[in-house]
Structures are given as C-alpha cells and as structure tokens.
Image: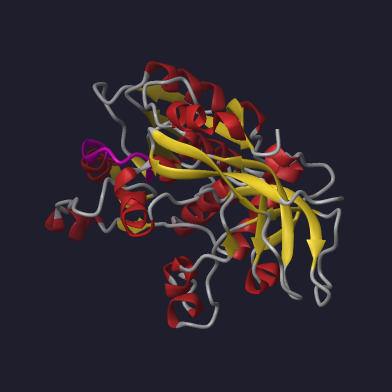
C-alpha cells in the first residue's frame, strides 16, 4: 500500500483531556516493522490518572494504547518472520526471559516490562515495531479472528496469567469482585475452566446484570451476604472490596489481586487467622508471551467469547469522547474500541 506522509494519533493529558495530534508516519529500520492499526481497546489503566500521571508530568501528552491488532504494511529487509499483509496482534512490552523473576515463572515482575518497544502507541494510525518486539511482541492473528477480537488477546492474556496463579479451577467455587471488563473475562475464563459456582459482586446494577449474562451463577451487590469461595479475584480498586476478599476466602484457598487503588494504598492482613487457614494471597500484573498465546487459542477456539463485550466504537477524530465513555464508572460501557484509521 502507498503510505501517507503523516498520521493522526491520540495524546493523553488526562482522561478528560485527550487530543488528536499529527506527526510523520514513522520510518523503520532493517529489522523493524510498520503496522497499520485496525483496532485498539481502551484499557482501564489508560484512564487512571494516578497510573498515567507521572509519565504525563515528565513528557507532556503521552500516546497510550496496548490492546492492538492490525496489519503489517512494511517490513525491513532483514525481517523474515512477518511480511506486508500479515494480520497481527502486538504488545508493547514483554519480559527478558533471563532474569531470576523470569526463570521463576514471574515474568511480568521483570524489570524489562517497564520498557516500551513500539512507537508511538496503539492509539495511532501506524506504529513502528522495534526489533526486539518483532521477535517477542508480535503474534499472528488467525484468519478466523477479527481485528476486534484481536484487541482482546492482551486483556484476556492478563486474566489467563492471574487465574493460572491461583491453581486448579475445576470444581472450585469462585468469587469475583468487580464486573467491569476484567471481571467479566474472569467469569468467562473460570466458567470455561470448570468452576463449580461463580459469584460476581458489583455496585453497578447494569454490571450485575451483565455478569449474569457472562456466565456468573449469581451476581450481587456488596450490601448483600457475600459467600466464601475457594478462589477470590479482586478486579476493582475498591478498598472495601479488598477487605471483603480477605474475609471471604475459604481455608487453603487463593486470593488474587488483579486491580489496585493507587500507589499509597495499604491493606491489613489478619495474620493469625490466615496462619491457621493458610490461604494464598497473590497479585498479578500484565501478561507474558505464553499468556498471549494461550489467550489467542482461547478466543480462536471459542473457549472464551468476547464479541458481546464491545459496547462502543470510535474513530480517531472522536478519541476524546471514547475516553470519556471508558472512564465513566457509572456508564454502561464495557469495552471501548478505537479504530484509528476510520
């Protein structure tokens, strides 16, 4: 395809201040790839000011977006693994696979996960894929999957990783706090893995109903009696949810914190009770390549359906509105998709 000289991209200053800017289409080196972005989902982390704010303060506006699917439109002379026309899913960071954390299976604790290997970011019409990412951060998108489904690979991979950390799911009871996109993916994955009973907890009546449709056996308000469970997932930054999770885990069970509520938040652990009950308290951040491959297979096979989770789609010129919708917790939105080239 003939490439334009310039492209549009989104600049984030705050969730209520996202602007459309323009810059030259990136040049690529001999071991790099250029991807035309078809879809990029807005992650909850893209709208969190405490999480994005420090980068904004350092750099001014930033281009975020990491739930990326698109088409390779140019490849450097030394690239053999991809060629123009290939449909791909792209991640912006990945572990080194050589440090102690990686070798212990804690790949997303790797210091290299702080590095970014695409330029600028997924909310752009085109992205340059740096050499390390060509080898470790690009995954072929099966012909049976749409680009929109491809945008779910990274968020589902994050859930795959967290659920793996909590051990076997088949025959275990599951309790999920928060029924936003992450909570719903936890419902769908644990249902696929054979959970005996799934209970979802949320304050939003719309999301309570959505959790039922996603496969929860029960979906309740936190003001109702919360059952105990073998596997407890915290998919909201609510401090009350975190406290409730500690009280709800069964003996020998697992609590997994998938979401947090800012860098200065702390949680008091009931040490003596946990000493006798022996639950495992864990945390999960991001996804590693093995999680991406597993998520791709789950979506491609129909093991986890994602089409019903998209509620809004916006072109680049309306990215500010897209962020407003995605950052409104009382809105009925689930997954908001940006299509930069529409």
Q: Is residue 133 above or below residue 294?
A: below
- Look at the image and tell me whether residue 223 can be seen: yes
95 left or right, relative to 305: left
185 left or right, relative to 307: left
Q: Residue at the location (76% across, 39% down)?
A: 146
Magenta-tinted stretch: 231-241
Locate the C terminus and report the quarter of the image it occupies. top right
- Look at the image and tell me whether residue 254 can be seen: no
Quadrant in which residue 83 is drawn: bottom right
As for residue 301 lying within the magenta part, the answer is no
Q: Residue 334: where, in percent of width, then height?
A: 51, 29
Foreground: 93 or 188? 93
Foreground: 35 or 278? 35
Q: Is residue 143 above or below residue 99?
A: above
Q: Residue at the location (59% across, 60% down)?
A: 119
Q: Is residue 120 above or below residue 230?
A: below
Q: Residue 102: where, in percent of width, then height?
A: 49, 76
1 left or right, relative to 166: right
Quadrant in which residue 301 is drawn: top right
Foreground: 196 or 58? 58
Name the colour scheme.
Answer: secondary structure
Q: Residue 254: where, in percent of width, then height?
A: 36, 52
Q: Residue 38: where, in percent of width, then height?
A: 71, 42
Quadrant in which residue 120 is drawn: bottom right
As for residue 235 lying within the magenta part, the answer is yes
Foreground: 35 or 179? 35
């Amino acid at each position: 395809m003939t490439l334009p000289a310039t492209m549009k991209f989104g600049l984030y200053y705050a969730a209520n201040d996202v602007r459309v800017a323009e810059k030259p289409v990136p040049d690529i080196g001999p071991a790099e790839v250029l991807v035309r972005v078809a879809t990029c989902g807005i992650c909850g982390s893209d709208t969190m000011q405490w999480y994005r704010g420090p980068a904004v303060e350092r750099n001014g506006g930033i281009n975020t977006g990491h739930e990326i699917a698109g088409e390779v439109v140019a490849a450097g002379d030394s690239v053999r693994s991809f060629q123009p026309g290939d449909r791909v899913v792209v991640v912006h960071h990945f572990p080194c696979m050589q440090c102690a954390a990686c070798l212990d299976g804690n790949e997303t604790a790797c210091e290299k996960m702080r590095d970014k290997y695409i330029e600028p970011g997924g909310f752009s019409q085109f992205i340059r894929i740096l050499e390390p990412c060509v080898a470790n951060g690009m995954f072929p998108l099966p012909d049976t999957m749409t680009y929109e489904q491809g945008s779910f690979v990274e968020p589902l991979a994050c859930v795959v990783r967290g659920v793996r950390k909590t051990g076997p799911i088949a025959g275990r009871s599951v309790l999920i706090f928060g029924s936003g996109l992450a909570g719903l993916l936890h419902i769908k994955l644990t249902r696929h893995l054979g959970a005996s009973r799934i209970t979802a907890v949320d304050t939003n009546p719309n999301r309570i109903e959505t959790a039922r449709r996603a496969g929860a056996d029960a979906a309740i308000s936190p003001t109702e009696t919360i059952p105990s469970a073998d596997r407890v997932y915290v998919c909201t930054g609510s401090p009350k949810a975190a406290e409730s999770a500690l009280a709800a885990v069964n003996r020998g069970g697992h609590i997994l914190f998938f979401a947090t509520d800012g860098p200065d938040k702390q949680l008091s652990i009931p040490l003596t009770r946990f000493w006798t009950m022996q639950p495992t308290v864990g945390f999960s951040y991001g996804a590693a390549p093995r999680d991406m491959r597993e998520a791709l297979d789950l979506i491609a096979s129909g093991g986890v359906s994602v089409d019903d989770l998209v509620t809004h789609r916006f072109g680049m010129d309306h990215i500010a509105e897209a962020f407003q919708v995605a950052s409104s917790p009382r809105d009925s939105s689930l997954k908001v998709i940006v299509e930069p080239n529409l």
